[in-house]
Image: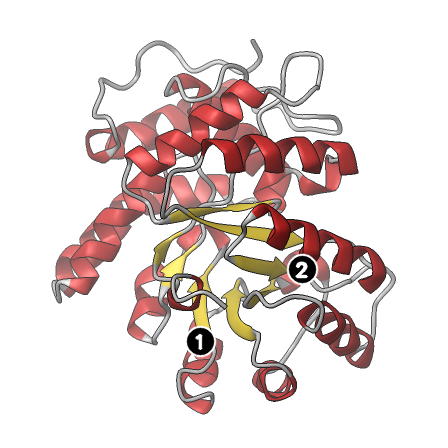
Amino acid sequence: MTEQAAELRGCYPILATPFLPDGEIDEDSVVRLVRHLNACGLPGFTMFGLASEFYKLSDADREALIEAAFEARAEGQTTVVSVTAHSHEISVKQARRAEEAGAEVLMLLPPFFLGSSEDDIKKHVLEVAGATSLPIMIQYAPAQTGVKMGVEFFLELNRHSENVRYVKVESAPPGPLISAITERSGGTIRCLVGYGGLQLVDGLRRGAVGVQPASGVADYYQHILRAFDEGDLEAAYALHAEVLPLVNLLMQAIEPLNRLEKIILKKRGIIAHDYCRAAGYEPDDLMLAELERFVGRIAGRLYPSAPWPVDTLKGGE
């Protein structure tokens, strides 16, 4: 494993998947988004998460996105690639392709369809971990997958494979699990906060090393992380409080999150279209007004700083 990959720290947003109005991949917008995240000073990004609409992508889509994103990324821009297939045979192929492309870390979403047993999930993870030299991050999202795991599950995986080095914690509440994993592993397993960073400061205080929000306002999270790293806990809490109304609005469900994130990205001029593949979600006028209000509260801290709103937020094209 590379030195860089073994030291994830900071914000690694989930890369949205930009589409053209006909539903095809918008590779130009992928390039702009990757370059934007680098210009913001973020250390890297994550591909094929729930906020990437991974469940609506074909194998050809994944390949096109990998080619576009990896071509656009800057030197030193770390890429985490999520492996999402439910069979280890296909997951191994996805993992090897990501490593071949130049990924530094793999994020593994455990198979959950039809209620996989804990033993089945362990076998799946270890098969993938054994097929690559890259560090593995387990995405633990019980609300979305129905899969519940205790701290011993992650410790056992690490005992069997040192590749299992990270957990993206999206349980509710995340704090006790972050504390338990960090303390009982002696720091061998590191945690990142998921679920939009809803409990980010608490997670950092318990030993989390970063956060993986969606990409719409990912640049804002740097301010929180910087304040925390500088030891200014009150500033970190205050900055977190500013973004919480937006996080609360976004994190009601996956489809509203993806739709609203794309509206933000389009309005910021980062992607060309805010199209989501069906089945999707359409916000009403009151939700759009809340989105405008809550993004407006933090707009002055986004990169590059620009007036907000530019015009009235609207969905569609």
Q: Is residue 7 above or below residue 98?
A: below
Q: Residue 246, how many percent across, how many down?
A: 39, 39
Number of numbered markers: 2
- Which mark's residue is nearer the viewer, 1 or 2? 2
Q: Which residue is mark 1?
A: 178
SS for callout 2: loop
Residue drawn at x 37%, y 69% is 208
48 up-or-down from 287: above or below: below
Can see residue 199?
no
Secondary structure, mark 1, is helix
Q: Looking at the image, which residue sits at the far right?
A: 114
Label 1–label 2 contact, CB within 8 A = no
Question: For this rendering, which residue is in front, 51 or 3?
Answer: 3
Quadrant of residue 26 in the image?
top right
Residue 213 position in % (x across, y down): 45, 48
Q: Which mark is residue 132?
A: none
Instruction: Classify mark 1: residues with Cα within 10 Å, few (<14), some (14-19) or many (20+).
Output: many
Measured from the top left, where is residue 13 in percent x and y? 44, 46
Give how far apart the Cα atoms at labels 1 and 2 are.
Answer: 18 Å
- Identity of the amino acid at label 1? Ile
Q: Residue at x 37, y 61 (%)?
A: 210
Q: Nearer the viewer, residue 218 or 280?
A: 218
Indicate the quadrant where residue 179 lies. bottom left
The residue at 46%/90% (across/down) is 184
Asked whether residue 18 is in view, the answer is: yes
Q: Which residue is mark 2?
A: 109
Whether residue 63 sits left or right of residue 224 in the image: it is: right
The answer to whether 122 is drawn above or below residue 89 in the figure is: below
* In-image side of 150 versus 172 (left or right): right
Which tag, 1 or 2, sits closer to the chain's start? 2
